[in-house]
Image (cartoon, grey):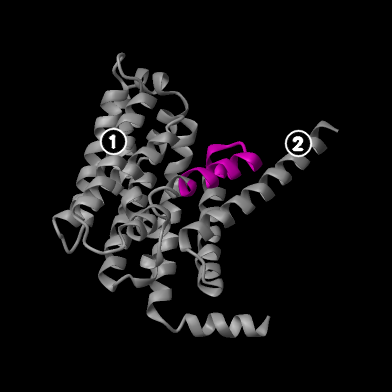
């Protein structure tokens, strides 16, 4: 145990490890807060769809040889989030069909562009690292950390300032509209914020694993708590702890960051599920 702590202490001496933990914790916190709303509103599939869009946007940025691909990725992903929301409200194209069309199309176009305009000899490796996460979280510059911190703080402020509105729209949109709340505007706000989180999380877990950051904390919290506030607080703590443990474990045992975080999430969910099942059985008894 002492050797483990000594090894961790040595790693914390490197700036890239501290940067990775800061970014990972911020992204996990933001994902967990909005994930509760998405799960309750049955919008969790939007996160998966937008992650594919972000992959396509990153491929376009690669073709254009942009040194900083985040602005383009943010713009395209936010526009896609708005398009998904508007298209999903139409009678002819339901929400799940709209997500399927946009996400699959973006994934296919992105992969095709990366092959047509390959910037390296290992296209398959680049695609795999983008989809499932890579060590890019461990090569973040201080500028990347600041950008992530500013966007994360903005997301947190939006959630705190509009907590009551988000709560009302999440549980009873019809009642919220009847009381004067502009439900469509808040749904749009939620979609835009999720788009920002998706882009931020690309460096952490990869585009195919992003949904895990959104879904697992919310589902785990719902196994143990019933009130919206309790679920929100627990999901935030859960997400921060599992992400930090996943990043540290990936550094110590040399495994992919994204896959390790998701594995820790799965284990934590199983523990929460067992505790919830035991508590439910005790209450019935």
Q: Is residue 182 visible?
A: no
Q: Is residue 221 magenta?
A: yes
- The residue positioned 51% from the left and 85% from the top of the image is 10
Can you say whether 225 is above or below 140 in the image? above
Going by the picture, which residue comes out furthest to the right?
285
Inter-mark Cα distance, 2 to 1: 43 Å
The residue segment tinted magenta is 212-231
Q: Nearer the viewer, mark 2 or mark 1?
A: 1
| Closest to the observer, 251 or 236 | 251
**Label 2 packing within 10 angstroms: few (<14), some (14-19), many (20+):** few
For this orientation, the residue located farthest to the top is 91
Classify 187 as above or below 36: above
Q: Residue at x 39, y 23 (%)?
A: 176
Mark toward the start of the polypeptide (2 vs 1): 1
Classify residue 226 by image quadrant. top right
Asked where in the image residue 181 lies, by quadrant, the reply is top left
Q: Place residue 20 in its image quadrant.
A: bottom left
Residue visible at 58% across and 57% down?
Answer: 264
Q: Which residue is mark 2?
A: 280
**Closer-to-camera residue (162/86):** 86
Q: Which secondary structure lies at badge 2?
A: helix
Question: Residue 144 at x, y = what percent?
Answer: 28, 66
Residue 193 image point, x, y percent: 32, 44
Compared with residue 10, is residue 133 higher up or lower down, i.e. above or below?
above
Which residue is farthest left?
64
SS under mark 1: helix
Residue at 47%, 80% (x, y): give it: 12
Image location (x, y in percent) of residue 273: 68, 43
The residue carrying mark 1 is: 105
């Amino acid at each position: 145990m002492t050797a483990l702590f000594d090894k961790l202490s040595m790693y914390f001496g490197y700036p890239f490890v501290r940067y990775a933990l800061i970014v990972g914790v911020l992204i996990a916190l933001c994902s967990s807060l909005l994930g509760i709303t998405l799960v309750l509103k049955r919008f969790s599939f939007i996160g998966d769809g937008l992650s594919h869009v972000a992959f396509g946007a990153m491929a376009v940025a690669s073709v254009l040889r942009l040194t900083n691909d985040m602005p383009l990725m943010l713009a395209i992903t936010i526009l896609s989030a708005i398009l998904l929301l508007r298209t999903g409200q139409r009678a002819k194209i339901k929400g799940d069909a709209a997500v399927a069309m946009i996400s699959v199309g973006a994934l296919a176009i992105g992969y095709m562009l990366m092959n047509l305009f390959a910037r390296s000899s290992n296209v398959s490796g680049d695609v795999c690292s983008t989809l499932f996460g890579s060590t890019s979280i461990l090569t973040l510059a201080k500028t990347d950390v600041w950008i992530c911190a500013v966007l994360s703080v903005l997301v947190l402020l939006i959630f705190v300032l509009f907590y009551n509105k988000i709560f009302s729209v999440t549980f009873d949109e019809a009642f919220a509209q009847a009381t004067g709340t502009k439900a469509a505007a808040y749904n749009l706000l939620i979609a835009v914020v999720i788009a920002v989180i998706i882009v931020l999380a690309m460096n952490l877990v990869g585009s195919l694993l992003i949904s895990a950051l959104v879904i697992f904390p919310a589902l785990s919290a719902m196994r143990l708590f019933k009130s919206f506030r309790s679920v929100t607080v627990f999901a935030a703590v859960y997400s921060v702890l599992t992400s930090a443990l996943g990043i540290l474990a990936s550094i110590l045992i040399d495994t992919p960051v994204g896959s390790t975080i998701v594995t820790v999430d799965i284990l934590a969910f199983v523990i929460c599920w067992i505790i919830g099942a035991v508590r439910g059985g005790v209450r019935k008894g």
